[in-house]
Image (cartoon, grey):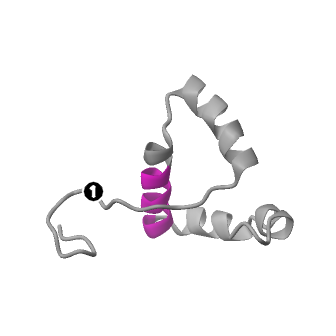
Amino acid sequence: MKNANNSTQPWQLTSIKVLSEIYSSFKVDGRSENVTLQKLVNRAMYLYSTNEEFRNKIKEVETLSENYKTGY
């Protein structure tokens, strides 16, 4: 599988901004559940791409966009 850089590496290094308050909460919850940010992002991207119900659920979340308009 080739990534955006036309490489056959399985990983694509990227940089994203996350909301500090949500990330802090996630770190606590994720640690207790043994879920890393990388694991969450990969699974969420997979579900978003393959599961219409999950995609719609993500699209329905308005709280973040309303409260953090400058966040993303």
Q: In which quarter of the view is residue 13 placed?
A: bottom left
13 in magenta: no
Q: Name which residue lies at 63% across and 69% down.
A: 56
Residue 47 sits above or below residue 6 on the image: above
Q: Is residue 69 left or right of residue 9?
A: right
Q: Is residue 68 left or right of residue 20?
A: right
Q: Where does the image place residue 9, in percent across and percent down from the top left?
A: 18, 60
Q: Quadrant of the C terminus?
A: bottom right
Q: In which quarter of the view is residue 6 placed?
A: bottom left
Q: Where does the image place residue 40, in percent across and percent down from the top left?
A: 50, 47
Q: Classify 10 Å Cα crowding around label 1: few (below 14), some (14-19), many (20 and above).
A: few
Residue 38 sits above or below residue 28 on the image: below
Q: Quadrant of the N terminus?
A: bottom left
Q: Which of the pair 35/9 is nearer the observer? A: 9
Q: Name which residue lies at 44% across and 44% down.
A: 39
Question: Which region of the structure is painted magenta?
Answer: 41-50
Q: Where does the image place residue 68, in percent across and percent down from the top left?
A: 80, 65
Q: Name which residue lies at 72% across and 66% down.
A: 71
Mark 1, secondary structure of its residue: loop
Q: Which residue is mark 1?
A: 11
